[in-house]
Image (spheres, rainbow, N blue to C red):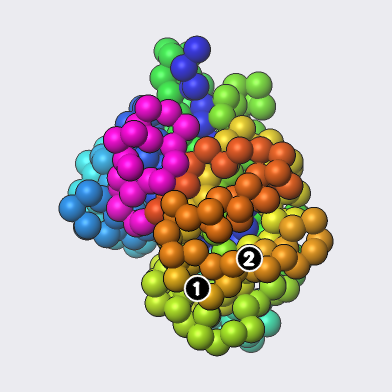
Amino acid sequence: MPEQVSVVVCLQWGDSGKGRLVDYLAPQHDAGVRFNGANNAGHTVVTDNGDKTVLHILPSTSVDKKRAVLTPGVLVDPSVLQDDILCTGIDPSFVYIDKRCPVITQSDIDEDRSSSHNKEKIGTTGRGVGPAMRKQIERIEGLRAGDKYRDLLNDMGVQITDTVRLLHSVLDKGGRLLFEGAQGFGLDIWHGSYPYCTSSLCTTGAVCTNAGIPWNRISAVYGVFKAYSTRVGQGPFMEILDENIVSTIRRIGQEYGATTGRPRRVGWLDADLLKHALRVNGCTHLCMTKADVLCGLPYVVASIDHRVRKYEGWDSLDSPAFSKYINDIEEYLGMRIGFISAGPRRNDWFRLPDSRAMMAR
Ligand code: IMP
Ligand code: MG
């Protein structure tokens, strides 16, 4: 049975390279679906020829001009949607927006940016997501895509519809859907480090509650994490203390917010967070990204089983030191890491669970 519903979620604080895995999985699917968050997200896709596209609201599959769906639970800023449509070159009639998606207005953005609570204490992306979500919860009338913003969105050529019925009709015909999570487990409003988190749901469960897909239709859940950690904004974090290592990782890994340009805080891998995140998300596959960024460091540290472990550094992903790092993580998580990415380009994979592994190496 082909996998009909695949979900990609981040097990850390976002920016783990979900867009990259989605780009890899896209050819096996008929449509890409965003089911949470808003344009606080920044998903980077680098194609074979090195072209880099950063998407904020459309799913990363839009780079390949796949049909794009935004379900309830996604908040939409129409001007950012317009920018994403232009930069991908997708036909706007391929973009389906649920009539219930809340619309982010200029007053939401102004409020997010002028509040010192949001800006300094939480360190939000300033995209108006929290204030727009608050209005949704307060049940203010008329602020959804199908209400007074319908004409504006229709003029852009996108389709305003009931995406839950649409997705079910695709599944009924045997179609295959790829759900791309935004943000990550550590930023989830319930499971993340409140109040240093985002205003939405960031786990697999949101595919059920937001997109209306029942749990027993989900066939695969890909948990994505980086070989180290980063975080933008405030909140608890196992920060790296050695400034040289931080600046090397930031430079080689390009660790600057894809949405805000802020330098990301850089930390070591927290396998304890991963273990909890993968059981809550029900992951069937694990994907480690940016393993190459750690090449050449004098040492690498990880928190595994609540103990800080120090590893010998490695110069290449073929080295025994890297295998030791991977083996210890896999043993603790009780799961094989099926995908390891070794560079930003489409085909830069070190380990893949299928025959394409041979092609990529
Ligand atoms: P907000 O989502 O803009 O309200 O920001 C709340 C917190 O979530 C801040 O710490 C942001 O930096 C963080 N955040 C929101 N979206 C993302 C994302 O896509 N990647 C990484 N951090 C994010
Ligand atoms: Mg990002």
- Mark 1 vs mark 2: which is more N-terminal? 1
Q: Is residue 349 visible?
A: yes
Query: The disc labelled 2 sits on which kind of residue?
Result: Tyr
> In the image shown, does 166 or 293 lie closer to the viewer?
293
> Taking 96 as reference, is 136 above or below it?
below
Please give the label number shown on residue 75. Answer: none
Q: Assign ligand 1 to one image quadrant.
A: bottom right
- State which region is magenta: 343-361
Q: Is mark 2 within 8 Å of ligand 1?
A: no
311 on left or right of 110: right
Residue 259 coordinates in the image, percent (x, y): 43, 69
> In the image shown, does 92 or 235 lie closer to the viewer?
235
Q: Residue furthest left?
A: 49
Residue identifier under label 2: 311
Residue 355 coordinates in the image, percent (x, y): 37, 27
Q: Residue furthest right?
A: 306
Residue 42 position by quadrant = bottom left
Q: Residue furthest front?
A: 320
Spatial CA distance of label 1 from label 2 is 10 Å
Residue identifier under label 1: 297
Residue 216 coordinates in the image, percent (x, y): 65, 21
Q: Residue at x 44, y 37 (%)?
A: 352
Residue 18 coordinates in the image, percent (x, y): 47, 50
17 on left or right of 26: right
Q: Residue at x 40, y 77 (%)?
A: 251
